[in-house]
Amino acid sequence: MKKIQYRIAVVGASSLLGKEIGDEIAESPLAAANTILLDTEEAGGTLEAIGDEAAFLQTLEPASLENLDVAIFADAKMLKEYGQTARALGASVVDVTGSDFDSTAPVRSPLVGDAAPLDLEANSVRVAHPVATMLALVLGLAGRAGDLRSAAATVLQPASENGRAALDELQQQSINLLSFQAVPTEEFDAQVAFNLLPTLGEAARNPLALSEERIRRDLRGLVSTLPQPLLQLIQAPVFHGFGVSLFLEFDQPLTPGALQAALSSEYIDIAGEEPPSNISSAGQGRVLLQVKPSPDNARYAIWMTADNLKLTARTAVACALELTRLKPLGTVQ
């Protein structure tokens, strides 16, 4: 029997990122696909929304992964348990978790462009970290304006990057501190509220060092021919949205305005006098930035922000779209 529409599953659909991916599918060329929301037994039966449409969360089990074209995994534990099953049943896997499920799978961020097309036999991709996407976008376009000598970036990470539990803990820490009470530290093993930290406690569930290494790894996979920036990741006391302070140095001074012109892109908005913020970037799948040149136009300070969940979801859906092109409609799969 011939297919008339793609079947896509969002696994871990009740998570912050899973919900964002479902919404992004509804706004993408995959909106006409049959989208299935999968999660744990506890979450099964919950009514969720995909864009303007209502959908029930189904319990994740092997049978629910049959006859899929693409499975987008937004939960590392579920990916570890069911990822191989999904592939064995014929689904291509989109790993949004940054796990080591398939270290041979290519790191992808279709928003960056210029990447080689996927191999026709590809059945798994790793979605690039949102900061890797941000840096790859800017570095790749900046490299067209002139020869980059060096780069350095300080990244401010929001709590929501580590899921709902981390978000809730930051909220509770803020409330407790204002009430002069002890703060919970199960997620961060440190006081994050009203604080900036380059490292978390030893018992933190998501150490900054691991996130920093993933950003470096993914960035190398996206722009291997450009200078890799010196990177510092800071846990910020904000709920949503990455902020990145990027410094670029060119071998030769650029013509005034050349860098801003080179950075013009579908996925980049260049701000005027008002600097971008994690608030102004909320809900947008683009990078907002402001460029500050040195007097000699050889060095630049760039402040940029992005909605971490929206940017990751947009990248994940773009990866899913790439994989569906390897499974054309109207043919027997």
Image: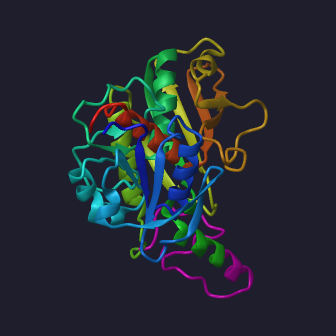
Question: Relative to 298, does residue 303 appear above or below in the rendering?
Answer: below
Question: Relative to 289, does residue 80 appear above or below in the rendering?
Answer: below
Check residue 197 for magenta coloring. yes
Q: Is residue 311 visible?
A: no
Q: Quadrant of residue 304?
A: top right
How far across and how far down the image is residue 60, in percent? 37, 66
150 lies left or right of 285:
left
Q: What stretch of residues is rendered in magenta?
A: 174-201
Q: Quadrant of residue 262?
A: top right
Question: Relative to 79, does residue 296 appear above or below in the rendering?
Answer: above
How far across and how far down the image is residue 176, in percent? 68, 82
Placement of the N terminus among the 4 image quadrants: top left
Q: Quadrant of residue 175?
A: bottom right
Magenta part mainly helix, strand or loop? loop
Image point (60%, 83%), residue name: 183
269 lies left or right of 223:
right
12 lies left or right of 119:
right
Question: Relative to 131, does residue 19 appear above or below in the rendering?
Answer: below
